[in-house]
Image (tube, rainbow, N blue to C red):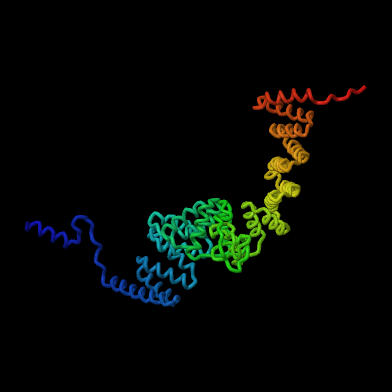
């Protein structure tokens, strides 16, 4: 036991750490201790100057502290901050890069360097600095700056993921919810976009543009008017926002009573954007008219489209005329419907020409319901001319001719059906009809 005790004393005397075999660093000399003490004093004074807004003085003092002891990364970090506050980003970058070269895991230095890059709009630099730091620490500041940088680099998938992580760490950031909503809207994730925009509003961020974007998301979710309710609003007026409701129209015979759309509807949000002073642009009115159209309020939609026709920009005209045409159809203006659809086709043939045959059939059916057999036949003829390879159109036209007692024309159409589809489901029925009406058809007069 005694020998063991002496051995322990000897080990400690020569500066070895028992159990590790690693020697302690040699004791510092008096001069080194004095330098360290002086450097610490300079650092404390420099930090005080930095905290009291004396940035130039802080730079002088902290630069001396770094010169006195270059091993202290905290000295360099404070010096870099002082340079930043003094508006001298160049020297700040130099010191921050030096810190990261020695200590790659220094998150604070990386974040400060990324902030400098962000102010310079050097988004690539932000990403290059921060991405390697994720393996050392997952924090809000890093994800937020990465999200902003990748968003500005149009790397939307990355930006979306970074904003999602940032919000997990800081769910109270209204601006992050708003930016995430923009990314979801651009990616056509409409439900997620609506949720993000609503979170931003709940957290205190609000603007007419945000309301317009939320209206766009809700429109694409087909939430046009939401769950309509009947509300009482004194001195209310249709088309106004009142107490969290959009007043659609007065209830007949009931004073101060309106059918109203709730706040979680597209019409409420676009009306709120207008009420809050959004710039008077054609796309705002186009969206409002489209909401009315898709909610099957065709007369109001038609009037809205009619008012903005001259203001629609060239790139949106084809879609505008297509929607305008649907409103015309909804109020029974069938000739106007086809004329407006022709305008859309003329502007974008690839997108809208395939709808022409269906349009002719829709108009034909409307005239058929009105008992206008001649017009029914006329529009079916147009449909057949536009799509002569469609057997079902020939079949419809054949039956229409039969109803009009034009049996010879009916037979021609039924024969075309069998030529196009020899195994048609009504093959035997059509053969019998052809046989029946060929016999009953009046004989053509002989010519010499």
Outermost residue, left direction? 2
Q: Residue at x 7, y 56 (%)?
A: 1
Q: Residue at x 67, y 51 (%)?
A: 323
Quadrant housing residue 393: top right
Q: Position of residue 356 (x, y in %)?
A: 71, 42
**Is residue 85 left or right of 255 when viewed as pictured?**
left
**In front here: 374 or 271?**
374
**Is residue 315 left or right of 130 when viewed as pictured?**
right
**In front here: 104 or 302?**
302
Residue 346 visible, this orientation: no
Q: Position of residue 15 (x, y in %)?
A: 20, 61
Q: Position of residue 38 (x, y in %)?
A: 32, 75
**Is residue 241 left or right of 93 when viewed as pictured?**
right
Tell me the quadrant of the picture where the C terminus can be found: top right
Q: Residue at x 75, y 31 (%)?
A: 402
**In front here: 28 or 372?**
372
Q: Residue at x 23, y 57 (%)?
A: 22
Q: Position of residue 352 (x, y in %)?
A: 69, 45
Outermost residue, front direction? 253
**In front here: 33 or 150?**
150
- Vertical order, 130 against 60 (above or below): above
Total marks in image: 0
């Amino acid at each position: 036991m005694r020998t063991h005790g002496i051995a322990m004393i000897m080990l400690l005397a020569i500066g070895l750490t028992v159990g590790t075999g690693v020697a302690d660093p040699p004791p510092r000399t008096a001069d080194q201790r004095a330098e360290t003490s002086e450097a610490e004093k300079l650092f404390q004074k420099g930090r005080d100057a930095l905290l009291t807004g004396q940035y130039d003085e802080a730079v002088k003092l902290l630069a001396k502290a770094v010169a006195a002891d270059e091993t202290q990364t905290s000295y360099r970090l404070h010096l870099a901050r002082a340079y930043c506050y003094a508006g001298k980003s160049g020297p700040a970058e130099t010191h921050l890069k030096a810190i990261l070269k020695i200590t790659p895991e220094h998150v604070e230095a990386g974040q400060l360097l990324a902030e400098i890059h962000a102010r310079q709009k050097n988004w690539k630099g932000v990403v290059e600095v921060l991405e390697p730091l994720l393996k050392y620490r997952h924090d809000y500041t890093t994800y937020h700056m990465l999200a902003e940088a990748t968003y500005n680099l149009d790397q939307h998938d990355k930006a979306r993921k970074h904003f999602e992580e940032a919000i997990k760490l800081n769910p109270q950031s209204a601006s992050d919810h708003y930016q995430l909503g923009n990314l979801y809207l651009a990616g056509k994730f409409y439900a997620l976009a609506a949720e993000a925009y609503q979170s931003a509003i709940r957290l205190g961020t609000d603007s007419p543009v945000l309301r317009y974007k939320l209206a766009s998301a809700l429109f694409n979710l087909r939430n046009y008017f939401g769950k309509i309710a009947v509300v009482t609003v004194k001195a209310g007026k249709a088309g106004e926002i009142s107490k969290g409701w959009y007043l659609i129209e007065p209830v007949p015979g009931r004073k101060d009573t309106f059918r109203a759309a709730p706040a979680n509807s597209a019409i409420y949000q676009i009306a709120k954007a207008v009420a809050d002073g959004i710039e008077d642009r054609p796309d705002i009115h186009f969206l409002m008219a489209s909401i009315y159209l898709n909610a099957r309020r065709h007369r109001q939609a038609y009037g809205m489209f009619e008012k903005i026709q001259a203001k629609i920009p060239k790139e949106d005209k084809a879609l505008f005329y297509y929607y305008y045409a649907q409103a015309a159809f909804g109020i029974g203006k069938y000739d106007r419907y086809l004329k407006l659809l022709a305008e859309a086709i003329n502007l974008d043939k690839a997108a809208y020409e395939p709808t022409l045959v269906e349009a002719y059939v829709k108009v034909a059916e409307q005239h058929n319901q009105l008992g206008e057999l001649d017009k029914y036949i006329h529009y079916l003829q147009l449909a057949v001319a536009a799509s002569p390879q469609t057997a079902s159109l020939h079949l419809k036209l054949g039956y229409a001719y039969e109803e009009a007692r034009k049996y010879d024309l009916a037979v021609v159409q039924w024969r075309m059906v069998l030529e196009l589809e020899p195994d048609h489901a009504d093959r035997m029925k059509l053969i019998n009809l052809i046989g029946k009406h060929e016999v009953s058809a009046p004989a053509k007069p002989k010519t010499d």
